[in-house]
Amino acid sequence: MHRYEHLLSPITIGNITLKNRLLNSKCVSSDAMEPELSGPFYEHLARNGAALVCIGVGALPDCEGNYSRMASCHMDDPKSRRQYEEIVKRVHAHGSLATASMMAIEPQNVMISAVPDWNAIPMTGDYSANLFEKPEISPERLEGMIQDFVNASVYYKDMGFDGVTIYASYRGSILACSLSPWFNKRTDKYGGHTMEARATLTLEVFRRIKEACGQDFLIECQISATEEGGYTLEDWLRYCKLCEGLVDIFQIRGWDGSFTHVNSHNLDKFSPYNLQFAAAAKKEGIKCLFSPVGGFRDPDVIEKAIAEGKTDCVSMARAFISDEHYIDKIQAGRGEDLIPCLLCNGCHGSFCAVNPYAGYHHMLDQMFTPTGIKKKVAILGGGPAGLRAALFASQQGHTVTLYEKSDQLGGQLKFSDHVSFKWNLKDYKDWLIRQVEASDVTVYLGTEATPELLRNRGYDVILAAMGSTANRIPVKGAEDPKVWLAEDVFGHESELGENVVVIGGSATGREAALYLAKAGHKTTMVTRGDAMLFDDPHSKRATELDYENEPNFSYIDNAVTTEITPTSVTLDVTLDVPKFEGDFGMMFMMMEHKEAPSVMPDSRPEGFPPRAEPFDPHAAFEAENDKGGEGPGGPGGSGGPGGPPPMPQVDKSRLPHEIRRLTCDNVVISGGRTSVDASAYQGIAKEFVTIGDCFYVDGIRNCTNTAFAAVMQL
């Protein structure tokens, strides 16, 4: 019996067979919907094990002749069409199926209905800032939208796609909001007080797609299984029952993005959050496939869930991206060798912290090409950069020796041994150490590789991965040795008193404060700007909740530290600073607007509405924005009548200030880091390169990429 027998087994939907139980949830490459560049990315997903690949396609003209700004290319451009048809053929060549993401169908300047009281709706999620009052979509425009879904499905079927993926999650679309008792207040046939009544719109979309495209054309519905304060799990199960024979696969997501784009703050790695909803649906015996998404990375966890009948499949993106050979290792029964995904969501820009190839599949033949000459390599430092460089170099056939001055490998990642909410980093650290121990790399622990030690050992290459050192801040009293550095508190929390002030609101200071709070200390974090309890907007709410639910944690923001003693902190606090919620629209505002052809050839299938020529996409965009439609801010636009107002600027000098003195048992400071100076090693070997923090201070992605680049140029 194979270790992953159930995970690797095929499954049938009607007359359609999926090659295994691993599906790709919707994701895009670094070049989004530029098909000649993103094609290799989607082909990689199929080659790396995805039985179903959801492809981010461009826009087709809607019933009013406009193109959605949710997509950067036009699918009725013959060139784009041919390129996407080639992508589908490449996916099929690996035995995988392809669906087209339908995100660029709905109009962005209207809502399912008018909402009487927006203030009554819970708006705590990552995506909530994109929800604002828009006019109700008219019955005529709603009928046009339904037909747009049908026409697009016919078009994609003709291109060779096996189905479509329809977006109905996070209250992030008209279809999603149509299911919500908060947002669907319609009094016509598409509204009502029950889930059965509110389901009418989506059921009609599904039914008409099936009628136009046939029963074997797959419909995958990306849906939230519950809604905060809105529809319940029981409501959703009734909805799934209504969809039998129409929806082939429910790709199950959480009520908000952070319960899908999970991180180490809210993922139980042995029981991912959305698995519970698939298990409930399976228990009801509903006749369609269920595929939860969010944190499915460990093949042993996936195998167990399928074997126990809790789900049919799982949907993933990050696991396929983080390891270039995900399916190869699973087929070989070596799940422990998979590179652990850090759950950092960097791949929402298609760049991975642990896989240097991610996002570059369209240019692999242009990447660094090793010389093929085997060299003797010394690596100075056993942290994430040094360990990864050792693995890369060993895999290239070089003779590698790694020197670590402490008695333990791991570098700065060793702190994760003590921090429950950084188990993702511990997994990665432990994986690095296991892989190095199983390799041909020679490791010397407790050995400081001085220039004198290395000078006569015949090394061709020295890679300096000596890391960085913590800074103290330029504030009176910060140099006192009784003032703690944030990096020193992990594992030593018992040496601190009950009340602790942590100065610094970046990741290190913030996490040190939460760590101490969870250990029982009354901890106050102080930061000069607005307190940001998250780094990644895709898992914003999950991270915030971990801080908000910790009673021992508090913060003071917009506070400049003016003096420190070992038991007190003096602050200059700006009062009455307004708070602003960022949103995903703001990210779109930062994206470059790419030029499009002034005239788009009309190659639409029969049934599409006529369109006057020539068509100017820029003029259409401006016209849509003028009427409160979609602008470069994504859904709802930015600055138009239908969009959120631009982010205001605050002049803090005009606001009142207050001097505060906090007394405490200990002060902890987080003041950034400085690269270790490795210049003394230049000239000892023919080649000398600094990598990781020793090159410049940044995160694990920097460690991975600088190690990879250095080795691939040897």
Image (spheres, rainbow, N blue to C red):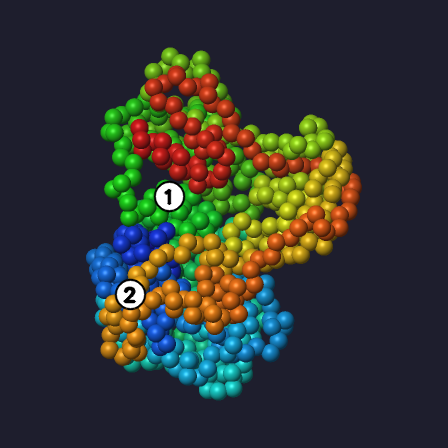
Percent position of residue 539, x then y: 52, 55
Mark 1 Cα within 10 Å, few/some/many (few <14, many 20+)?
A: some
Q: Quadrant of the C terminus?
A: top left
The image quarter containing residue 56 is: bottom left
Give the secondary structure at mark 1: loop
Q: Earlier in the sequence, mark 1 or mark 2?
A: 1
Q: Is residue 210 visible?
A: no
- The three-letter code of the residue at mark 1 reads Asn
User: What residue lies at 36% left-to-right and 18% top-to-bottom?
Assistant: 685
Percent position of residue 489, x then y: 63, 36
Q: Which mark is residue 599?
A: 2
User: What residue lies at 38% left-to-right and 69% top-to-bottom?
Assistant: 620
User: What residue lies at 43% left-to-right and 47% top-to-bottom?
Assistant: 341
- The three-letter code of the residue at mark 2 reads Val
The image quarter containing residue 416 is: top right
State the residue position of label 1.
355
- State the residue lying farthest toward the bottom: 188
